[in-house]
Image (tube, rainbow, N blue to C red):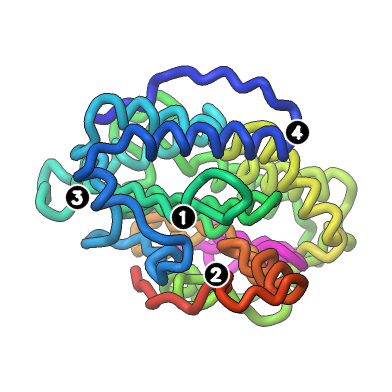
Amino acid sequence: MLALGIVLILQSATPAGAAAVTRNAAINLVDGFSQTERQSGRAEFDDPRRTAWNYLPGERFGVRLDELDAGSRMDLDALLRSVLSAKGIAKVEGIRALEAFLGKSQPERYNEGAYKLAVFGTPSGSNPWGFRLEGHHLSLNFTAPMNAFVVTPMFMGSAPFQLPSATRAEDRPLGDERDLAFALLRSLTAEQKVKAIIGANVPADIIANPATAKMDSPAGIAFAEMTVDQQKGVSALLRVFADRLRGDFADAEMKRINDAGIAQMHFAWIGAEDEAKPHYYRLQGPTTIIEFDCTSGTADHVHTVWRDPENDFAADVLRAHLKEHDHAHAPSPPSTPVPATK
């Protein structure tokens, strides 16, 4: 395994300062790239591959983790730790450990070194830039347009749900995402469940997939219709997703969700009320779609996605910037990428 074990102590206390730390970490990474790494892992910000995210096994743009030299691996570790929390890093490593487990029987298809790093644009000055770490069951996309920092879309999945001899949290990397959701569901009254449970037949996969972030109006039970304790359960579940990020970024995301209208957040459930059977849930609000999909017959294959329908890849920020400055040659907002299926 390519361990991500270098400890990076961050001094900033604000999202803007945190974004500057991330930018500096990215500068160190790309400045240290070998010629081969640069050719494989760099592209212009307006390259269409920047928004063509995917979470399936197969080929994708970027430089493979197992082809990075030792210096670049250390620089990547510092970059990831500038945006991800210790919990987030543990989830990434847990997902890759599950990939190694699958690779024991199918090494050509499942390989923990096949994850790829791609840097788009130049992480210096005021120009927009971003980077992606992606492979099977993982797509981390970070975009820094001007003074903003956008963390969606973010995909994490796992198959199996946990390692057979699981003893640590990272052995079941999406355990909290499932446990807290079941706790919330079971806290609902029978009358509330009538609103929250919107179907028995689970979808085949996440609905807000790479083909589209659009979704129908929120379904399920509204945050405003819950008790105070249930609302705390919703906030705790949202926080699990936000806490994949380092503190400043996590706090900023929770503030963004609350400011957009937490009372309009809806919790919807489809499928069984049993962890051992297929189930699905969704949190949907004005700026947020979170899905958890565990729909295989054995309920042992999980997909999660976190999206901002209007501002994935900083599309809304870039659109506003274009409108304000009328830059004829400025980078365009993302186009719709190629869809992915489970």
Mark 1 surroundings: few (<14), some (14-19) or many (≥20) residues within 10 A:
many
Q: What range of the chain is rendered magenta?
A: 266-291
Q: Are marks 3 and 4 in contact (CB under 8 Å)?
A: no
Q: Are marks 2 and 1 in contact (CB under 8 Å)?
A: yes
Q: Position of residue 242 (x, y in %)?
A: 64, 44
Q: Position of residue 232 (x, y in %)?
A: 80, 43
Q: Nearer the viewer, residue 73 or 90?
A: 73
The kind of residue tagged 4 is Thr
Q: On the picture, is 286 further left or further right than 43?
A: right
Kindly report the secondary structure that dominates the magenta region of the rendered protein.
strand
The kind of residue tagged 3 is Tyr
Q: Is residue 288 magenta?
A: yes
Q: Secondary structure at mark 4?
A: loop
Q: Are marks 3 and 1 in contact (CB under 8 Å)?
A: no
Mark 2 surroundings: few (<14), some (14-19) or many (≥20) residues within 10 A:
some
Q: Residue at x 73, y 76 (%)?
A: 323
Q: Residue at x 27, y 61 (%)?
A: 60
Name the residue beneath numbered marker 2. 331
The circle drawn on residue 14 is 4
Q: Nearer the viewer, residue 154 or 128?
A: 128
The kind of residue tagged 1 is Gly
